[in-house]
C-alpha cells in the first residue's frame, strides 16, 4: 500500500499514430496543489482527461487509492464523483438554472434528496459569490460567473480532488481575476487536492506545492515553485518561463 492519492506509472496516450503522452510518471499526495505548465499542445489537458477517464490511456497505469482506474470492475461513476473536473468551456447545462446545474449531479450520482442537494448547492454558490444568480440561466451570466458556477457544481459533489483544465483560458482578461480568487481560496483553505493546468504563472508560483513542466508529451521537470521559477534545472523550463513572464 502506498500513501499516494494518485500514482501514474508509464502513462502513454496516442491518437492514431500521434503520440500525445510519453512515459508519464508522477505521484500526487492528498491535499497537494499541483500546477501543470507548458506550451499549448504539449499534452497537459490530455493528461487530466486520462486521469478522469474522459480519454482511455494507450499504455501505463493510473492508480487512485491504489486501485487501477482502468481495471475491469472499477466504478467510474463513483470515481468521477470523487474526482471533479472544471473545464475551459464551463460545460454547464444551458437549459437549467444555475442552482439546478449544481443539484443535478448530486441527485443522480450521489442519490441525495432534492432539498438536501439544493441546500448544499446554495452553500457553495454563496462560497463562490454566485448565490444571488441561482435562478439565472447560463446564457444570462458572464464567462467568469459561469466558471464560478462550474466550480460550485464540482464542490457540491464533495470531491477529494478537483482537476482544473485551463479554467481561465476562455475568459476575457478582466474576468480572470474573479475565478483565480475562488481558486486561491480553495488552494489555501479547502484542503482539497488540486491539479491545475494553467497559463497563470502567478497562481502556479504562489499557490502550488509543486509545479510540473511538460513539453512534447513528457514531464521535463517536477519540483517546488521556488526551484522551478528561480532555479530550474532544465534549459527548456527556463526558456518557457522567460517567455511567459516577459508577457506580464
Image: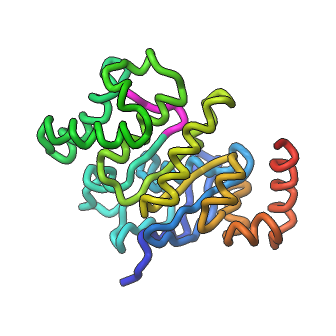
The picture quadrant where one finds residue 102 is top left
**In the image as oriented, which residue stretches furthest toward the top?**
140
Q: Residue at x 24, y 61 (%)?
A: 73
Q: Residue at x 14, y 35 (%)?
A: 114
The answer to whether residue 19 shows anywhere in this view is no
Q: Residue at x 34, y 42 (%)?
A: 124
Q: Is residue 100 left or right of residue 237?
A: left
Q: Is residue 175 above or below residue 65?
A: above
The answer to whether residue 53 shows anywhere in this view is yes
The residues colored magenta run 87-92
Q: Is residue 29 left or right of residue 124?
A: right
Q: Is residue 42 above or below residue 63?
A: above
Percent from the top left, x then y, of residue 188? 51, 60
The picture quadrant where one finds residue 240 is bottom right
Q: Is residue 104 left or right of residue 184?
A: left
Quadrant including the N terminus = bottom left
Quadrant including the C terminus = top right
Percent from the top left, x then y, of residue 82? 32, 56
Q: Residue at x 57, y 37 (%)?
A: 178
Magenta segment, prevailing SS (helix, strand or loop): loop
Q: Is residue 107 above or below residue 184?
A: above
Percent from the top left, x then y, of residue 192? 42, 60
Q: Is residue 168 above or below residue 17?
A: above
The picture quadrant where one finds residue 122 is top left
Color encoding of the figure: rainbow
Residue 229 belongs to magenta span: no
Percent from the top left, x then y, of residue 182? 51, 45
Amino acid at each position: 500500500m502506498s500513501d499516494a492519492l494518485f500514482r501514474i506509472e508509464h502513462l502513454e496516450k496516442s491518437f492514431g499514430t500521434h503520440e500525445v503522452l510519453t512515459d508519464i510518471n508522477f505521484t500526487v499526495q492528498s491535499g497537494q496543489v499541483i500546477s501543470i505548465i507548458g506550451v499549448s499542445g504539449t499534452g497537459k489537458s490530455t493528461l487530466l482527461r486520462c486521469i478522469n477517464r474522459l480519454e482511455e490511456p494507450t499504455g501505463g497505469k493510473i492508480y487512485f487509492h491504489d486501485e487501477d482506474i482502468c481495471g475491469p470492475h472499477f466504478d467510474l461513476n463513483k470515481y468521477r464523483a470523487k474526482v471533479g473536473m472544471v473545464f475551459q468551456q464551463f460545460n454547464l447545462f444551458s437549459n437549467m438554472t444555475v442552482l439546478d446545474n449544481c443539484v443535478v449531479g448530486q441527485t443522480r450520482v450521489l442519490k441525495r434528496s432534492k432539498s438536501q442537494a439544493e441546500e448544499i448547492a446554495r452553500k457553495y454558490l454563496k462560497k463562490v459569490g454566485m448565490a444571488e444568480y441561482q435562478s439565472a440561466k447560463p446564457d444570462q451570466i458572464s464567462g467568469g460567473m459561469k466558471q464560478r458556477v462550474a466550480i460550485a457544481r464540482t464542490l457540491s459533489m464533495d470531491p477529494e480532488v478537483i482537476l482544473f483544465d485551463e479554467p481561465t483560458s476562455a475568459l476575457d482578461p478582466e474576468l480572470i481575476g474573479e475565478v483565480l480568487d475562488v481558486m486561491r481560496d480553495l488552494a489555501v483553505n479547502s484542503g482539497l487536492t488540486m491539479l491545475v493546468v494553467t497559463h497563470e504563472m502567478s497562481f502556479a508560483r504562489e499557490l502550488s506545492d509543486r509545479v510540473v513542466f511538460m513539453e512534447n508529451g513528457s514531464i521535463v521537470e517536477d519540483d517546488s515553485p521556488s526551484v522551478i521559477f528561480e532555479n530550474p534545472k532544465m534549459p527548456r523550463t527556463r526558456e518557457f518561463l522567460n517567455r511567459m513572464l516577459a508577457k506580464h
